[in-house]
Each structure stands twice: as structure tokens, then as C-alpha cells.
Image (cartoon, rainbow, N blue to C red):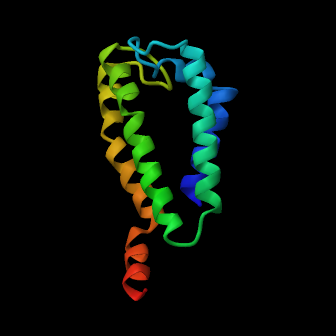
Amino acid sequence: MALGAALVAAGTAHLTSKRQEFRAQVPEWVPFDTDDVVVWSGYAELALGAATLVTWEQPHRARMGRVGALFFLAVLPGNVAQWLERKDGFGLDTDQKRLARLAFQPGLMAWALYAGDTRAQRHVAHRA
């Protein structure tokens, strides 16, 4: 529930109050309009958050956990680019802060897998 709510909140922020801040996470090499990337990634986060909130039964819940982990992996290049390109955003105004943020990315991926409760999915599969 917490992960789904966090994703919905982040997606909403992409489209409203934090739109400018999220622009700092779009790498310069992305061949699309920066604002379009922020908007579409906001829609993706809203959809992922909503799906995470409503998916309870296995094996679908485990699949959503894997999709969430892959989403966090997919946004990693943007976070790395923010560090390498020295772009300020979300209070990350030093190289040290931007680099420290990268350490949380594996935790987000693990949280998504945990939220998907893949252990329970394996248990259900073994009973079948």
C-alpha cells in the first residue's frame, strides 16, 4: 500500500507542483522534449501506483512487484545523469547529495519486489 501511494504521489507531483524539479532528472541525451518526458513518466508512475494499490492476488501481485523494480531500474539513468550533469533538483545541490541519492535506488527496487511478495507467489505456485 505504501509503495503504491508513494508512486501515485510522485506521479501527481510530476504533473503538478514538482514538474520543474523533475526536469533536472531528464538526461541531456534524451531525444525528446524534457517536459514531455516528465509528463509521460508522471503518467507511468500514476498507472504503476494505481496498479500496485489494486493488485492483491498472486501471481499478479508478484508481477507488479517485478514491474515496479524494472521501473526503478529504468529511471536510474536519469538519476545518474543528474549527478554527472550536476543538475540541481529536489534539494540535491551538491555532487555528494546527488551521489548519495543513487545509493537509495537498489532499496527502491528491493521495496518493489518485497511489495510484490514474490515469496508468497512461489508458495502458491508450489501448492498448485
Is residue 64 toward the left or the right of residue 114 in the image? Answer: right
Q: Nearer the viewer, residue 24 or 118?
A: 118
Residue 50 position, x and y percent, is 65, 51
Residue, x 54% and y 54% (percent of image)?
3
Q: Percent x, y for residue 113?
A: 40, 59
Residue shown at the point (61%, 33%) measured from the top left: 42
Whole-percent x, y for residue 92 in the image: 42, 24
128 with respect to 4 (left or right): left
Quadrant, the N terminus: bottom right
Viewer-closest of 96 and 24:
24
In the image, residue 126 sits, relative to residue 67, either above or below, namely below
Please state if 110 lies on the left or on the right of 40 as rendered.
left
Name the outermost residue toward the right: 16
Snapshot quadrant of residue 94? top left
Q: With respect to residue 109, does 20 lie above or below? A: above
Q: How many numbered marks are there?
A: 0
Which of the 4 image quarters holds residue 30?
top left
Pick the front one: 41 or 88: 41
Q: Position of residue 66 (x, y in %)?
A: 42, 55
Q: Quadrant of the C terminus?
A: bottom left
Q: What residue is shown at x 44% (from left), y 16% (from top)?
A: 88
Task: Please tell me which residue is depicted at 35% across the width and 14% down the height of the picture.
Answer: 86
Q: Quadrant of residue 118?
A: bottom left
Q: Residue furthest bottom?
A: 127
